[in-house]
Image (spheres, rainbow, N blue to C red):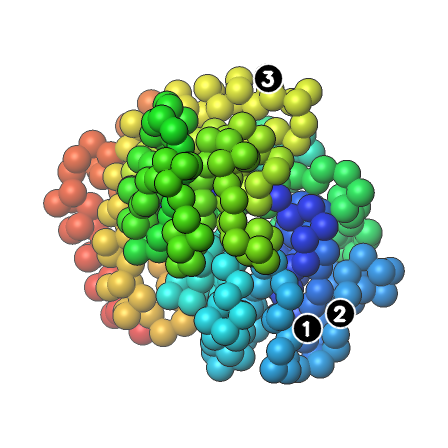
Amino acid sequence: MFYPAHINLQNRKCLVVGGGTVAERKVVAMLVSGGDVTVISPDATELVAFLARIGTICWHKRQLKAGDTLGYFLVCAATDFTDINTAVYTEAHEKNKIRLVNVVDVIPQCTFAAASVVTDGELMLSISTSGKSPATSRRIREHFEKILNATSLYTLGYEDGKPVPIASEREGRGLPYPVYFLLENRTCVVLSDQKTQEIERRISLLNRCGAAVVCIAPDEVKPKHFENAFLVIADKVSTVDMPSGDNDALIREYLDEPSAGTHFTPDLIIDDNLIISVSARNSAAVGKAKRLHERLTNHFKNNGYGAFIEFLGTRRSEILKAFSTPKKRADFFETLINTVEMDSSQPQVCCLGLINPECSAECLFNWIRHGNLARGNAFTAKLLDKANEGC
């Protein structure tokens, strides 16, 4: 499981290496969250070039050079070249000790993973399947867009196919930047005089994510405790006295004053590896966020989504080996997830229980959530054999 966090990017320096469609999405998300964005790439999409031309972002139209990652709060590598992406990670994280580094689609070279995001301007929802089923994450995101009349960050920046300005939130409070920390074996320090319900919640989440959790009373903390820490969670701002120069680099959450930290842990709906978070842009939308959280909890918690995602995750390596390109793999997952077995010749697409939670169609989703793993495995193997015959 990945740790859900909403990062405060307000006026913080963010670097995107790459200028393609994926890089463009990163740029848009960071801008909406108030980030000060720089792009390094010889080429760029029409929108990225437009945003640079009107002064919303800074674009260095060239290849990456040594030292380019120094001084940034967050770095993302989104090029089509493995050697460049690896160089970004090595310099940013290993040399410059930048904690927030993401290499798109390469989990071992990430300290955080991007979330699938939906916003209506007041609320922001993020969806993660902990990397086990991007296709399911996308289906849930598209469902939220419809029922909430909301917008995916993927569609911002264009009107009628032409690039348009994206409002910068640097002067005010932007929407948070939803991510998922990869905490396996990373040291996370929890500072608290007593284990309140909120502190216990954080500790439980850290443990589920495989973090090396160190709990310390504030009066016992020493500078050495921060030396190898990835993040710090404290019940009070006053309890954290970090070494000079590390205050901006260390990822930290303060329960008594969330805006003073680099991130906060949002309200969550968790069903194994499905994690949905809900946050409000301002205090006026808090009530709306709470109502939506309750509604989504009733729909998604303990309704089989976690088991379904876990099943797809267990077959993922096999499917990756069976198909040579990302598109072929994505197409197979779509076929696998969408198929409904029925007597009628009229085709039907699986709704994943999103439209009708009580749906009882003969489909992979229903077999898995009702515990019929044998049928799910047999069905998957049958589709794999059929796909291999067609190659």
Examine the rendered structure and indicate whether residue 8 appears above or below residue 108.
above
Q: Residues within 10 Å of mark 2 (few under 14, many from 20)?
A: many
Report the side of 46 relative to 298 (left or right): right
Which residue extends farthest left? 374
Report the side of 287 relative to 43 (left or right): left
* Position in image of residue 79 (x %, y %): 57, 73
Examine the rendered structure and indicate whether residue 331 appears above or below residue 237.
below
Q: Residue at x 53, y 17 (%)?
A: 291
Marked residue nearer the N-terminal end (2 or 3): 2
**Distance from label 2 to label 3 (Cα)?**
40 Å
SS state under label 1: strand
- Residue 101, can we see it? yes
Marked residue nearer the N-terminal end (1 or 2): 1
**Distance from label 1 to label 3 (Cα)?**
41 Å
Amino acid type at image mark 2: Trp
Q: Is the residue under label 3 in contact with that under label 2 (CB below 8 Å)? A: no
Marked residue nearer the N-terminal end (1 or 3): 1
Amino acid type at image mark 3: Gly
* Position in image of residue 357 (x %, y %): 37, 25
SS state under label 3: helix
Q: Residues within 10 Å of mark 3 (few under 14, many from 20)?
A: few
Mark number for residue 40? 1
Disc 2: which residue: 59
Amino acid type at image mark 1: Ile
Disc 3: which residue: 287
SS state under label 2: strand
